[in-house]
Amino acid sequence: MSDTVQRRFNYSSILIIVFLFGAIVSAGYLFWKTETLSAKVTSLETVQKDLEMELASTTVTLADREEFISELETELESTLDDLEDTEDDLRDEKNKNREFAGQIEDLAGTVNVLDRLSKTDKELLQKYSKVYFLNENFRPSKLTEIDKKYVYPDRQAQFFHSEAWPFLEDMLKEAKSDGVELLVTSAFRSFEEQTVLKGQYTVQYGSGANAFSADQGYSEHQLGTTVDLTTTSVGGAYTSFAQTEAFAWLAKNAYRYGFILSYPENNVHYVYEPWHWRFVGRDLAKYIHRKNIDFYDMDQREINEYLISIFD
């Protein structure tokens, strides 16, 4: 074999060896790579299985929680229904309590009214002149002496019902502040005093005294809530009192203090007495003034409704 051929053979052998070595290396690398990938696939499959198991577990847990939430929602609805029923019951109880409180208040008011009425002389608003007889033993529960500055000079001490006195005093003070003179000539008169007075009038005027003087037991003065008023210019000439500034002031303002003119013009009981004023309480006096009616023309039952407020 020539050198050239030998060299070519050697070169070919080397190439074959190199090729085989490369093939072996490549095959080894591919095997290693395949094993590595296989291991990764196996690992990933394991991870996938773990995730699938975890997902399955989570799904079960989620289902349980959804069921639990559903149960809670059902329980909440039931609780809300119970709460609504409770609110309705509470509202009903509150309404009952308000109604009961109202009944108690009405009862308390009734008791208070009855208590006040029991402490108020029922005679104070009776129509005594020739209608009702006032017992000879009747006397106001308490009398107050009228301040002497408001009493006509030649008169003895005069007394007025203690609970009505503040109203009379206010009226006399207000008149004075308006420059109007008002003087009391007669206030409370007992049964005996009325007897003596009527006797004197009868002696002087005969049966004519019945036109202007009440018999004992029929006089409003015995109630202690009535006054005869005059001025120094009029004195005892009562009939001319109607033409005075004092009477005009009373006609305009007396009702504001609870006083009325007992015997106005054209009354059927006595002659016109512009000097004779009776305390009946502000409410009734205002009503009579507003309606322009006479006390003695009213029904006694209607009058009695004002007894509870006579001293208000």
Image (cartoon, rainbow, N blue to C red):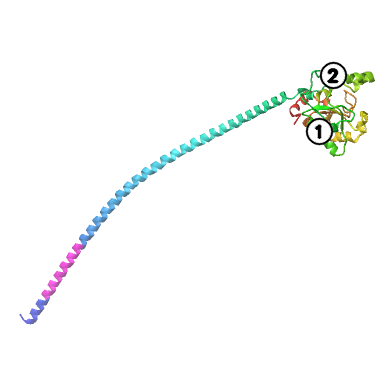
Q: Which amino acid does label 1 sit on?
A: Glu
- In the rendered structure, the answer to whether residue 26 lies left or right of residue 270 reads left
Residue topped by disc 1: 169
The residue positioned farthest toward the bottom in the image shown: 3
Label 1, residues with CA under 10 Å away: few <14, some 14-19, many ≥20: some
Measured Cα–Cα span from mark 1 to mark 2: 26 Å
Disc 1 and disc 2 in contact, CB within 8 angstroms: no
- In the rendered structure, the answer to whether residue 266 lies left or right of residue 61 reads right
Magenta includes 24? yes
Vertically, is 285 above or below 31? Answer: above
Q: Which mark is residue 72?
A: none
Residue topped by disc 2: 192
Vertically, is 91 above or below 221? Answer: below
The answer to whether residue 208 shows anywhere in this view is yes
Is 284 or 199 nearer to us in this picture? 199
Query: Where, quadrant-wise, is the C terminus in this rendering?
Result: top right
Is 302 or 242 nearer to us in this picture? 242
Name the secondary structure under disc 1. helix
Query: Where, quadrant-wise, is the N terminus in this rendering?
Result: bottom left
Magenta includes 104? no
The structure residue drawn at horizontal position 94% and vertical position 20%, both measured from the top left corner, is 204
The structure residue drawn at horizontal position 34% and vertical position 47%, both measured from the top left corner, is 58
Is 238 or 183 nearer to us in this picture? 183
Q: Give the range drawn in magenta.
A: 12-32
Q: Which amino acid does label 2 sit on?
A: Glu
Displayed quadrant of residue 65: top left
The structure residue drawn at horizontal position 91% and vertical position 20%, both measured from the top left corner, is 200
Q: Where is residue 304 in the image (x, y as percent from the top left)?
A: 76, 25
Q: Earlier in the sequence, mark 1 or mark 2?
A: 1
Main SS of residues in magenta: helix
The answer to whether residue 286 shows anywhere in this view is no
Q: Position of residue 57 (x, y in %)?
A: 32, 46
